[in-house]
Amino acid sequence: MKKYDIVKQAKIINIIIYSFMAAIGLFLLLFTGLTTLQEVILISVLCILTGGAKILGYFSNDLYRLAFQFDFAAGLFLLIIGIIFCFIGLRDPQSIEKMFGIYVFVDGLLKLQVAFDAKKFGIRKWFILLLTAVLVVGVGIVALVAPYAEQLSQFILLVISMIIDGLVNIWITAYTVRVRAKKKNLEERFGLDENETSC
């Protein structure tokens, strides 16, 4: 299989998984009648699938290595906590909310670096990447503070975090992975082969 085919498949799979994340968040926000077991299963499966998709993206070797550059560690983290949730989720449901809040916060921080790296590559919309990253960081901070503020619902913040993180990752994946090194100075600066820019 050609390299660009793997990149395209990783891109599509990640967009689907992030869409699933946003959809699950919206579903949990609208339908509050689920049992704790059902919520634990949904979130655990979501973490495992998202973690797997991130790891796949990391090994896809995309051209700019922006959207996927930190996804091995982030994917492994999600994969592990998803498996852990399967065993302890019912005994300590709040642990899911805390750990996912940590993930969203860290994911936002990593997206900040993606935005600055995008600027180095000459990507015009890097500032939008920066703003969306700041948004994710802000949501992550609020989610982390929620356990210590009685007026904030940690579960509501969890599902809002899912929706925002999912939508932001959809946009970042769709935008940064499809960008091509069309400019000659980028090809020379980063040692890119002309044939590789087609992915």
Image: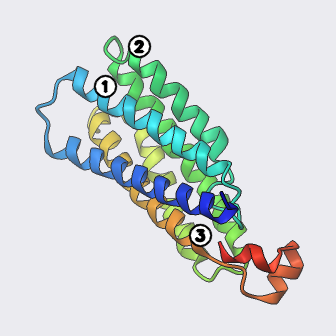
- Dot 2, crowdedness within 10 Å: few (<14), some or many (≥20)? few
Q: Earlier in the sequence, mark 1 or mark 3?
A: 1
State the CA–CA distance, disc 2 to disc 1: 10 Å
Residue 120 coordinates in the image, percent (x, y): 76, 74
The three-letter amino acid code for the residue at tag 3 is Thr
In the image: residue 129, left or right of residue 143: right
The image's mark for residue 176 is 3
Q: Residue at x 58, y 73 (%)?
A: 178
Give 199 or 111, whichever is nearer the viewer.
Answer: 199
The image's mark for residue 63 is none
State the CA–CA distance, disc 3 to disc 2: 36 Å
Q: Residue at x 71, y 56 (%)?
A: 61
State the SS at label 1: helix
The image's mark for residue 40 is 1
Q: Residue at x 84, y 86 (%)?
A: 185
Above/below status of 180 relative to 35: below
State the CA–CA distance, disc 1 to disc 3: 32 Å
- Dot 3, crowdedness within 10 Å: few (<14), some or many (≥20)? many
In the image: residue 154, left or right of residue 138: left
Q: Earlier in the sequence, mark 2 or mark 1?
A: 1
The three-letter amino acid code for the residue at tag 1 is Val
State the SS at label 3: helix
Quadrant the N terminus occupies: bottom right
Mark count = 3
Q: Residue at x 71, y 67 (%)?
A: 64
The image's mark for residue 87 is 2
Q: Earlier in the sequence, mark 3 or mark 2?
A: 2
Residue 21 coordinates in the image, percent (x, y): 36, 47
Q: Is residue 148 visible?
A: no
The three-letter amino acid code for the residue at tag 2 is Phe
Res 31 → quadrant: top left
Residue 152 coordinates in the image, percent (x, y): 29, 39
